[in-house]
């Protein structure tokens, strides 16, 4: 039973609520406009981070000290019929039965066991956490990070669009400029982004070494809406355009100055040094179709309308998939697809009634995927694998659904 | 096929619009109590409707729409407060056409209560609005806020203790002063 003063409070709230009584300021057109803004913002963040994840483990020394101590050699293309590489460790917490059903694992944080911390550098709000547990405090919160010069290059998304910030080795911001999301090449020695920098006032696709002098940049003129999605080689970068009037396209920038359009596709999702491009081929009201395409000759390997696509694994054996309709609220599923055939290798899906979604995902190594998962007021990094296993890679933290606290470093 | 898709879209819009028109006034009142500002409340509710529109096809239980909207509104309000630029975006210097009304018969008591509510930390304020305006149970409030029932109890208790100290004590002191 309420006390008199609580009743008084309730009456006051009722009275004050009448300040806006009978007011109907919101119409469907305004809601749809806002929905488009939300969808665009979420799509940019999600697809860009996914596109950055062209797999391969970043050597810890690369990020920590700025010195490349070990680099994996170029991976050979996948061979038909070859068995999958065995994983170094597989999440084992997902028990068969309740969590898995007919090959699909329920996407949820409930009941997951705690596995290892992420084996790649990641951002925990304003802190960079490296695989050996070192933590570097940064000046701000960013949505990706990669080593650059003697410090770092980070990206963020604000009111005025995407922004690049150059940090020193201590994590202090040195300068910022408008610029696109970035990608790194297979060896981790080059980064590509779009910005108008230097003497040029026109946007350029910039290919810059991640170590050493900034003077060795290559700049290729591109459309202002261009965003790189992946390297095919050190000199060839796939980028997408999405102009204000709704035009979409995928191009390959060839250093030093030319670009060629990839025919028959809309926006690209990702590209790999193994000569493959994942791109959207058709967009529908409530879905889309995507294909994996050979960069040499543009032949389609396969097409699916069940998923939109993300990053390729380091050996280009797998490619990530998620909802075919990116509704801006977050993705309800993660699929690991065979990059040769499009066959579903592992599938994670939220239950209809669950308030669960995936914000971004990245290949941790050739058989493991890290994803930031929101589950009813909690965020965590979850590790998934090609066998349908799932475990926590961070402890869950409380948070709003619109503020993902975890983001990943760019993976070559 | 194209026609079928078009009619599905029109059906979705019609269904959504009917819900929006029916519920926006009520949701706006809740948002206003959470924000204390008409413009921010409208922005908040519009954003919540936009998020609902995007996930309309995923929401299977139409009887849960109000609960879903409340959850979006509360979470989004917290996010709005965290994001300085969003506040700047929606708050203007212009005086709204219909500013907050003042009850001329409340002898200052209700204004003091309203002023107090607006000074509460956002989570406590959400608890107070959900519990005593929406008349939700502690469990329902906890569900929306994504916290335990114990947290709802403690936040409620703290807010009411502040209210008793800051509003009612002041009223008594004020009346004592008048008596003199």
Image (cartoon, grey):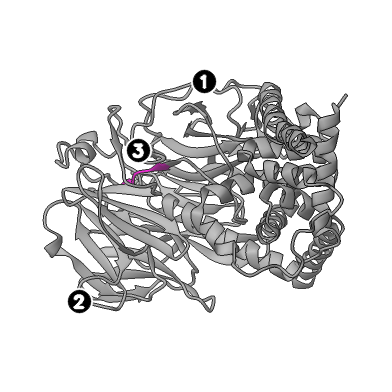
Mark closer to the observer (1, 2): 2
- The total number of labels drawn is 3
Q: Give the magenta part as a residue range.
A: A407-412
Q: Residue at x 45, y 59 (%)?
A: A158
Q: Main secondary structure of the magenta part?
A: loop
Using the image, name the chain to which the residue with label 1 belongs.
Answer: A
- Residues at marks 3 and 1, CA–CA distance in whole angstroms: 24 Å
Residue A25, horizontal then vertical, whole percent: 77, 66
Q: Along the horizontal axis of the image, is B115 left or right of A193?
A: right
Are discs 3 and 1 both within one chain? yes
In this rendering, the answer to whether B144 lies above or below B13 is above
- Residues at marks 1 and 2, CA–CA distance in whole angstroms: 53 Å
Could you tell me if residue B134 is visible in this image? no
Q: Secondary structure at mark 1?
A: loop
Residue A272, horizontal then vertical, whole percent: 34, 54
* Residue bearing mark 3: A127
Q: Along the horizontal axis of the image, is A170 left or right of A300?
A: left
Could you tell me if residue A279 is visible in this image? yes
Classed neighbour count for the residue bearing mark 1: other residues with Cα under 10 Å, few (<14), some (14–19), many (≥20): some
Numbered tag placed on residue A367 in the rendering:
none
Q: Secondary structure at mark 3?
A: strand
The image quadrant of residue A36 is bottom right
State if disc 2 and disc 1 touch (CB < 8 Å).
no
In this rendering, the answer to whether B130 lies above or below A46 is above
* Residue bearing mark 1: A113
Nearer the N terminus, badge 3 or badge 2? Answer: 3
State if disc 2 and disc 3 touch (CB < 8 Å).
no
Q: Secondary structure at mark 2?
A: loop
């Amino acid at each position: 039973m309420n006390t008199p003063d609580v009743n008084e409070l309730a009456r006051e709230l009722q009275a004050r609520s009448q300040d806006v009584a009978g007011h109907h300021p919101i119409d469907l057109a305004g809601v749809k406009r806002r929905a488009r803004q939300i969808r665009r913002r979420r799509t940019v963040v999600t697809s860009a981070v996914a596109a950055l994840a062209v797999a391969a483990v970043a050597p810890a020394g690369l990020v920590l000290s700025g010195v490349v101590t070990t680099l994996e050699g170029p991976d050979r293309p996948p061979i038909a019929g070859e068995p999958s590489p065995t994983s170094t460790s597989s999440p084992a917490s997902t028990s068969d039965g309740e969590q898995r059903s007919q090959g699909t694992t329920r996407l949820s944080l409930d009941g997951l066991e705690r596995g290892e911390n992420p084996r790649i550098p990641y951002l925990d709000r304003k802190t960079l956490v490296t695989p050996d547990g070192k933590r570097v405090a940064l000046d701000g919160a960013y949505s990706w990070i990669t080593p650059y010069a003697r410090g770092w290059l980070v990206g963020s998304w604000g009111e005025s669009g995407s922004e690049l910030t150059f940090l020193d080795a201590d994590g202090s911001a040195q300068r910022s400029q408008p610029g696109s999301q970035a990608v790194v090449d297979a060896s981790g020695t080059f980064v590509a982004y779009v910005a108008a920098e230097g003497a040029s006032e026109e946007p350029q696709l910039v290919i810059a070494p991640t170590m050493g002098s900034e003077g060795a940049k290559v700049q290729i003129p591109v459309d202002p809406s261009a965003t790189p999605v992946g390297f095919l080689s050190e000199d060839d970068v796939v980028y997408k355009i999405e102009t204000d009037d709704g035009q979409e396209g995928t191009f390959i920038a060839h250093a030093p100055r030319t670009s060629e359009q990839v025919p028959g596709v809309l926006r690209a999702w990702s590209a790999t040094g193994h000569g493959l491009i994942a791109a959207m081929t058709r967009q529908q009201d409530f879905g889309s179709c995507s294909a994996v395409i050979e960069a040499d000759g543009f032949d389609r390997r396969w097409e699916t309308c069940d998923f939109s696509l993300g990053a390729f694994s380091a050996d280009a054996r797998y490619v990530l998939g998620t909802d075919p309709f990116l509704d801006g609220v977050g993705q309800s599923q993660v699929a690991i697809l065979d990059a040769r055939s499009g066959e579903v290798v592992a599938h994670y899906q939220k239950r209809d009634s669950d308030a669960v979604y995936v914000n971004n995902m990245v290949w941790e190594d050739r058989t493991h995927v890290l994803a930031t998962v929101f589950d009813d007021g909690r965020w965590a990094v979850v590790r998934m694998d090609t066998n349908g296993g799932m475990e926590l890679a961070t402890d869950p933290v409380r948070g709003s659904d619109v503020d993902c606290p975890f983001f990943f470093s760019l993976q070559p | 096929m194209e026609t079928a898709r078009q009619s599905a879209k029109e059906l979705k819009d019609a269904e959504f619009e009917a819900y929006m028109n029916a519920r926006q006034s009520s949701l706006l009142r809740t948002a206003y109590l959470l924000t204390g500002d008409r413009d921010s409340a409208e922005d908040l509710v519009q954003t919540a409707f936009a998020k609902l529109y995007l996930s309309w096809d995923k929401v299977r239980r139409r009887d849960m729409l109000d609960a879903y909207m409340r959850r979006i509104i509360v979470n989004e309000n917290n996010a709005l407060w965290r994001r300085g630029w969003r506040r700047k975006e929606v708050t203007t210097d212009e005086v709204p056409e219909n500013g907050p009304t003042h009850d001329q018969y409340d002898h200052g008591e209700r204004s003091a209560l309203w002023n107090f509510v607006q000074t509460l930390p956002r989570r406590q304020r959400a608890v107070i609005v959900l519990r005593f305006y929406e008349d939700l149970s502690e469990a329902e409030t906890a569900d929306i806020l994504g916290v335990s029932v114990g947290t709802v109890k403690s936040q409620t208790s703290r807010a009411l203790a502040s209210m008793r100290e800051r509003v009612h004590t002041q009223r008594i002191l004020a009346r004592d002063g008048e008596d003199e």
